[in-house]
Image (cartoon, helix red, strand yellow):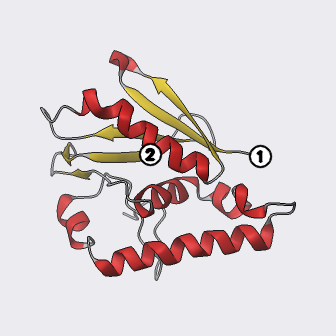
Amino acid sequence: MKEPGSEPDRLRVRTGAEPSTEAEATDTSARTAELRAALDSIRSIRHLTNLGANPEARPAEWERRRLLRTVSLLLEAEGIPPSAAGESGDPVRTGYRTCEGDRLATVLVCWVGPRGSGTRYQDQEHLRRCQEVLRSWGFEALEVRGPGGRRYLEVEASRA
């Protein structure tokens, strides 16, 4: 099965749902360099394709078509750790987890961790950091409370 947002010879994004062995294998200085290069590429794409006085301030069409990939990449590249999944799919590491939203052209960002890790009490602080990162890149990120009062972000590309 193909990973979301992955294509041959491209940086594999981490949504936080990857197996822990795969996530740990990519925690390297080479990964950090790849993420920095990806951020530079996003800036270049924006500069070349967006019109107006400040083309880098809003997402390009390319990003809108790959929203899950872009959001996941931005969070990791800005130093926010992705979660990782165990064999059962449950989180084994605390961090963000991204997935397609219920509405078209939206991505959900949750803060998850292993059972008993206290993530429920940390989620507001960490989601606020995710929100700051995404807003600084021109995305709209609205904090929502879901079932059981759990917080998450609903993210979409801004048009302004």
100 vs 94, nearest the viewer: 94
Total numbered badges shown on the rendered structure: 2
The residue depicted at 35 percent of the width and 76 percent of the height is: 31
Percent position of residue 9, x then y: 46, 83
Name the amino acid, label 1: Arg
Provide the secondary structure element on which disc 1 rests.
loop
Tell me, for residue 99, which label it has, or none: 2
| Up-down relation of residue 26 to residue 113 (above or below) | below
Q: Residues within 10 Å of mark 1 (few under 14, many from 20)?
A: few
Q: Is residue 100 visible?
A: no
Quarter of the image holding residue 99? top left
**CB under 8 Å between discs 2 and 1:** no
Question: In this rendering, would 30 be left or right of 103?
Answer: left
Q: Earlier in the sequence, mark 2 or mark 1?
A: 2
Q: Residues within 10 Å of mark 2 (few under 14, many from 20)?
A: some
Question: In this rendering, would 94 be left or right of 126?
Answer: left
Placement of the C terminus among the 4 image quadrants: top right
Percent position of residue 105, x then y: 63, 44
The residue depicted at 45 percent of the width and 45 percent of the height is: 130
Tell me, for residue 50, which label it has, or none: none
88 vs 96, nearest the viewer: 96
Percent position of residue 73, x then y: 47, 61
Q: Which residue is mark 1?
A: 159
The residue depicted at 58 percent of the width and 75 percent of the height is: 40
Quarter of the image holding residue 23? bottom left
C-alpha separation, residue under disc 2 versus residue under disc 1: 21 Å
24 vs 87, nearest the viewer: 24
Name the amino acid, label 2: Cys
